[in-house]
Image: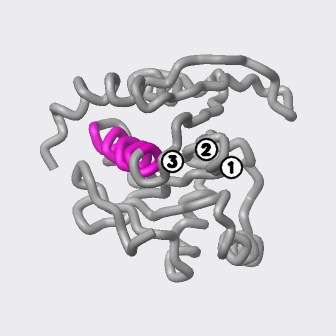
């Protein structure tokens, strides 16, 4: 991947060592951690070990999302399977002022564009806790369709979603017309 990818007023840059402490603090904040599948506290040592494990791992990619020259969150693709054409996207926006407006759509759209156009993937797979109503609405507005609702390991209910490139492009059109960046 090049040094960055830019669309919709958002730039994504590969996660770098200098970003680790900022990202760890974001990820450990209660408002972010409560929506993660793994909600355990992340130490500096475990963060560094995780980051070192990302090097040369083609099944996982993490970027810091920037908006107006400010780092605002993390976007990722995990379980990337180029043979199957699938991956599981992830995203969180840390500053509160960017969470309840068009900016999360901009971040999701750049990640989806990268997955479908740059990596050539054909299907994105999402998992959302049933009590995360905002994320459910967000995913459905982005074109995801519900495919299953199994139990998570800790007993919390998860909904499984899928996003095809065609469904994404169709869902993106009415939202993207409001993006002015």
> What range of the chain is rendered magenta?
102-116
**Helix, strand or loop at disc 2?**
strand
| Residue 122 horizontal/vertical position (percent) | 52, 36
| Residue 31 horizontal/vertical position (percent) | 56, 45
Q: Residue at x 55, y 44 (%)?
A: 89
Query: Is the C-beta separation of discs 2 and 1 under 8 Å?
Result: yes
Verify whether residue 103 appears in magenta.
yes
Mark 1 neighbour density, 10 Å: few (under 14) some (14–19) many (20 or more): some
Most extreme residue toward the left is 180
Q: CA distance from mark 2 to mark 3?
A: 13 Å
State which mark lies toward you, 2 or 3.
2
| Residue 104 horizontal/vertical position (percent) | 37, 42
| Image quarter in which the N terminus is found | bottom left
Q: CA distance from mark 1 to mark 3?
A: 15 Å
The residue labelled by disc 1 is 79
Q: Is residue 142 above or below residue 85?
A: above
Q: Residue at x 41, y 68 (%)?
A: 13
Which corner quadrant of the image does residue 64 belong to?
Answer: bottom left
State which mark lies toward you, 1 or 3.
1
On residue 87, which mark appears?
A: 2
């Amino acid at each position: 991947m090049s040094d960055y990818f830019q669309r919709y007023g958002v730039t994504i840059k590969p996660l770098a060592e200098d970003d680790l402490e900022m990202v760890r603090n974001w990820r450990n904040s209660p408002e972010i951690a409560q929506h993660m599948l793994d909600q355990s506290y992340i130490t500096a040592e475990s963060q560094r070990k995780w980051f070192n494990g990302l090097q040369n791992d083609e099944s996982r990619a993490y970027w810091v999302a920037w908006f107006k020259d400010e780092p605002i969150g993390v976007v990722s693709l995990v379980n990337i399977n180029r043979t199957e054409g699938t991956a599981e996207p992830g995203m969180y926006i840390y500053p509160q002022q960017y969470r309840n407006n068009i900016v999360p759509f901009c971040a999701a759209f750049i990640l989806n564009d990268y997955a479908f156009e740059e990596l050539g993937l054909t299907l994105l797979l999402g998992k959302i806790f049933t009590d995360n109503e905002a994320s459910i609405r967000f995913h459905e507005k982005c074109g995801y369709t519900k495919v299953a609702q199994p139990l998570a390991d800790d007993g919390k209910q998860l909904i499984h979603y899928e996003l095809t490139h065609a469904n994404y492009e169709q869902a993106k059109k009415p939202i993207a017309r409001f993006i002015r960046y």
